[in-house]
């Protein structure tokens, strides 16, 4: 990574919920690890770029101390501008070369390194691991993303071809280099199509994929001076040389959800050790990218995830039942729920049906497992069962919830982010979300997730500054209707007796504001 290239063409970061401390703490807890408390944690991001991730974390953990370091002056300036305009007081941004990072920064509970490790020379990779050793708290967690083999073996052919071509370009501007790279890839894909070869099909696929990527991604991923993918077992060995231990991977599900008649082979490999199993998985499924979680060597880590660990965590789920819950509890048969994205999920046990139904009602507020179990027993009138039966119910519920987590249906949290679920008289939306919306940036909620909202919701969200009541918002929208800035479709043939069109519009706007505020709260966008 060079200072000039990132200043000339900044890399636009993408917010990843799965990389946030809450997700890392939850995953490690499932492996028997005791992660640091999050409320006042010290958090460091190496290579923070424009601050997308560290700023979102700072918003969700207002009592935490968040640090972002990067070499690019331009990207840090953009990050600082966001921090200043949003008014965050718990973010420190520092322009510094990796080799200059030392123990004077202090100990951090969580360290994240994304989009950096594979793009720097070996000595800087060792420096990152050294920082993770020397600047990581005793029970801290570090998360490092990197490109992996064998997935990058074929991808590297594309990379090598484009880089070789760079040596023969007269104009060395970044824009020209990107244009030449895209042009060469198109020619190669066309020739491959003419030959109808396997290689040609591969190049066409790469062209289609890269044509959808931004220029900053293409340049920094493929045209920079260094891109060093490595095998997973090599990464673990490097980490061990710095007295660091492998905990798990952010995308742990890909190896657990293997669907093959040879599953028994993976089960046998797992008995040997996790690293061997994971490496065989990479070989057989051509994995090209990982985000691995590390801790200090010597810490207790269970090789398999344990459902009993759910007792230490909070659970959340955006699920709605397809069938009335009363029938779900009475009849011992599978029931179906839908996720926020419309995925249909089968829930088999009535205990779990009652649990996820309650979680859906509470969302986005997470529920501690013990409180959830108690609520399920009450709803199903099982609280007076024998101690032995209650123990069995608890085991069944924890195991099924763990499977739903592996299926990516429910969420686990070690800490509840600072969002508000109740709509106050004068609601306040996240200052960061309002700033991002105003500046046409991807919007982060208080769970460190991104999402899209419709134009009317955005219109209301921008005005949730604590100065307006729901009636004020209705009045604001009414004025926009009068000015022709907002349209409300009313079927006059369906008006109630003695109801005017203006009254119908008013009633429609009242209902719209109430629904919008409920939706904003449901998406963790309100603060106290």
Image (cartoon, rainbow, N blue to C red):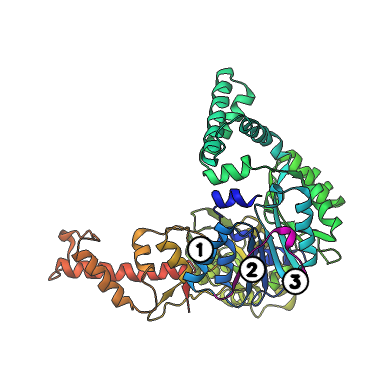
Label 1 CA crowd tier, 10 Å (few <14, some 14–19, many 20+): many
Q: Which residue is mark 1?
A: 444
Are the residues tagged 1 and 2 within 8 Å (C-beta)? no
Label 3 CA crowd tier, 10 Å (few <14, some 14–19, many 20+): few
Are the residues tagged 3 and 2 within 8 Å (C-beta)? no
CA separation in Å, label 3 and label 2 = 13 Å
- The boundaries of the magenta stretch are 89-103
Q: Is residue 424 left or right of residue 339?
A: left
CA separation in Å, label 1 and label 3 = 31 Å
Q: Which residue is mark 2?
A: 67
Indicate the secondary structure of the residue bearing disc 2.
strand
Mark closer to the chain start, 1 or 3: 3
Label 2 CA crowd tier, 10 Å (few <14, some 14–19, many 20+): many
Asked if one can make out residue 490 in the rendered structure from this viewpoint, the answer is yes
Counting every numbered tag in the picture gives 3
Q: Nearer the viewer, residue 61 or 218?
A: 218
Q: Nearer the viewer, residue 405 or 388?
A: 405
Asked if one can make out residue 261 in the rendered structure from this viewpoint, the answer is no
In the image, which disc is placed on residue 345?
Answer: none
- Depth check, mark 1 against mark 2: the one in front is 2
- Depth check, mark 1 against mark 3: the one in front is 3
Q: Is residue 132 magenta?
A: no
Q: Residue at x 80, y 60 (%)?
A: 130
Q: Nearer the viewer, residue 219 or 287?
A: 219
CA separation in Å, label 1 and label 2 = 18 Å
Q: Which residue is mark 3?
A: 104
In the rendered image, residue 388, in percent from the top left (x then y), is placed at 75, 75
Mark closer to the chain start, 3 or 2: 2
In the rendered image, residue 332, in percent from the top left (x then y), is placed at 59, 62
Mark closer to the chain start, 1 or 2: 2
């Amino acid at each position: 990574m060079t200072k000039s290239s990132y200043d000339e063409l900044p890399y636009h970061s993408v917010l990843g919920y799965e990389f946030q401390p809450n997700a890392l703490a939850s995953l490690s807890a499932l492996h028997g690890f005791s992660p640091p408390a999050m409320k006042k944690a010290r958090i460091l991001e190496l290579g923070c770029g424009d601050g997308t991730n560290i700023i979102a974390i700072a918003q969700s953990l207002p009592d935490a101390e968040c640090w972002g370091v990067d070499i690019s002056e331009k990207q840090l300036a953009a990050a600082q501008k966001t921090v200043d305009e949003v008014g965050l007081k718990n973010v420190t941004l520092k322009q510094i070369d990796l080799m200059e990072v030392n123990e004077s920064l202090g100990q951090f509970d969580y360290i994240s390194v994304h989009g950096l490790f594979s793009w720097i020379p070996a000595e800087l990779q060792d420096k990152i691991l050294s920082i993770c050793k020397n600047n990581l708290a005793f029970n801290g967690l570090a998360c490092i993303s990197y490109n992996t083999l064998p997935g990058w073996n074929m991808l590297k052919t594309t990379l090598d071809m484009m880089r070789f071509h760079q040596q023969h370009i007269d104009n060395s501007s970044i824009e020209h280099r990107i244009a030449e790279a895209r042009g060469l890839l198109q020619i190669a894909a066309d020739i491959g199509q003419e030959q109808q070869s396997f290689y040609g099909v591969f190049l066409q696929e790469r062209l289609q994929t890269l044509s959808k990527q931004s220029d900053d991604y293409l340049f920094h991923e493929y045209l920079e001076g260094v891109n060093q993918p490595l095998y997973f077992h090599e990464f673990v060995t490097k980490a061990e040389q710095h007295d660091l231990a492998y905990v798990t991977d952010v995308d742990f599900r890909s190896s657990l959800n293997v669907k093959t008649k040879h599953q028994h082979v993976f089960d046998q490999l797992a008995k040997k050790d996790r690293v061997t199993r994971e490496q065989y998985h990479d070989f057989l499924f051509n994995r090209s990218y990982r985000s691995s979680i590390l801790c200090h060597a010597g810490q207790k880590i269970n090789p398999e995830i344990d459902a009993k660990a759910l007792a230490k965590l909070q659970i959340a789920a955006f699920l709605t039942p397809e069938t009335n819950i009363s029938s779900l509890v009475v009849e011992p048969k599978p029931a179906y729920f839908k996720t926020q994205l419309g995925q249909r999920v089968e829930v088999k046990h009535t205990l779990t049906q009652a649990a996820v139904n309650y979680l859906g009602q509470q969302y986005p507020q997470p529920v501690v497992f013990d409180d959830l179990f108690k609520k399920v027993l009450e709803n199903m009138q099982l609280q007076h069962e024998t101690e032995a039966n209650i123990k069995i119910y608890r085991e069944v519920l924890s195991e099924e919830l763990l499977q739903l987590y592996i299926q990516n249906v429910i969420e686990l949290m070690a800490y509840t982010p600072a969002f508000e679920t109740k709509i106050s008289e004068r609601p306040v939306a996240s200052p960061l979300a309002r700033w991002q919306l105003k500046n046409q940036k991807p919007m982060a909620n208080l769970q460190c997730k991104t999402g899209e909202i419709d134009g009317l919701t955005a219109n209301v969200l921008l005005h949730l500054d604590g100065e307006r009541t729901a009636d004020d918002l209705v009045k604001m929208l009414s004025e926009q209707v009068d000015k022709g800035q907002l349209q409300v479709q009313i079927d006059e043939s369906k008006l109630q007796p003695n109801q005017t069109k203006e009254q119908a519009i008013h009633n429609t706007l009242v209902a719209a504001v109430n629904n919008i505020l409920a939706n904003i709260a449901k998406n963790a966008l309100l603060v106290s």
